[in-house]
Amino acid sequence: MSRKKIILVGAGQLGVLVSNILKKDKKYSIAGFVDTKKKLGKTVNGIKIIGGDDYLKKLPPKKFSLIICIGDVLKRKKLITNLSKKKFKFPPIIDKNSFIGNNTKIGLGTIICGHSVILNETIIGQFNIIGTSINILHNVKIKNNCVIGGGSTIGSNVEIDDNVFIGVGSVIASKKIIIQKNSFICSGSVVLKDINKNTKVLGNPARVIPT
């Protein structure tokens, strides 16, 4: 059976991480990276950068699946909007070294990196990045286009809205905390209460800081 062809959009460190996940999986054949025109023709992690900024406009959506390997939430949002209109397929990518609990749902285009634990009855929407060694407890709801940095813990019953960035090593306490959309949680923060939309927080306990 032939493997499905996939293109990775973004040849930075996240792109390298995702390419390593796919090499272990062997479900997909990596056709190449797409990045800026300046990097065209270079090789990253043994994979060639086959296209620049305009490459995806010409690409037939039925021939390739895509994975967005860019960690910036705003850049991801723009790409998701543009590429979804072209009807590309965006499979979820899950590292084999991660644990997924019972009745957990994972949406299209979501990346789950290695050594993460996602417990039962959790819902993870589309185009999220769940970094390395993350613990997500039961009954968590994560909407779309969120980035959760490595080593973070998301407590049970937490709800995270769209376009939220959670920095490395952060903790969201186990109670019905709601993180509203477009929020930015700095690395190492400990969140003990709801976070309003368009808010940046830092510290232990996390406090609002000017943006």
Image: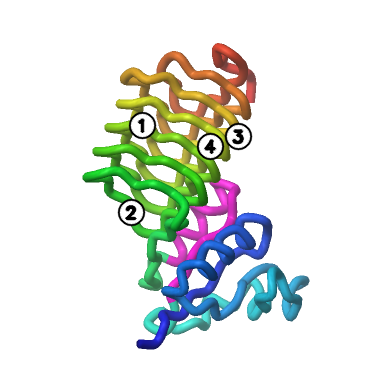
Q: In the figure, residue 110 lies in which quadrant?
A: bottom left
Q: Which amino acid does label 4 sit on?
A: Phe
Residue behind mark 3:
168
Taking depth in this image into account, of 68 and 55 the one nearest to the observer is 68
Nearer mark to the viewer, of 1 and 4: 1
User: Of helix, strand and loop, which one carries label 1?
Assistant: loop
| Mark 4 vs 2, N-terminal side | 2
| Mark 1 vs 3, N-terminal side | 1
Residue behind mark 1:
137
Per the image, is 136 magenta?
no
Taking depth in this image into account, of 130 and 196 the one nearest to the observer is 130
Q: Quadrant of the N terminus?
A: bottom left
User: Of helix, strand and loop, which one carries label 3?
Assistant: loop
The segment highlighted magenta reads 65-83
Q: Tell me whether circle 2 and circle 3 mark residues in contact (CB < 8 Å).
A: no
Q: Which amino acid does label 1 sit on?
A: Leu
Residue behind mark 2:
107
Number of marks in the image? 4
Q: In which quarter of the image is the C terminus?
A: top right
Task: Report the residue that reaches farthest toward the front.
Answer: 97
Nearer mark to the viewer, of 4 and 3: 3
Nearer mark to the viewer, of 1 and 3: 1
Per the image, is 74 magenta?
yes
Taking depth in this image into account, of 106 and 50 the one nearest to the observer is 106
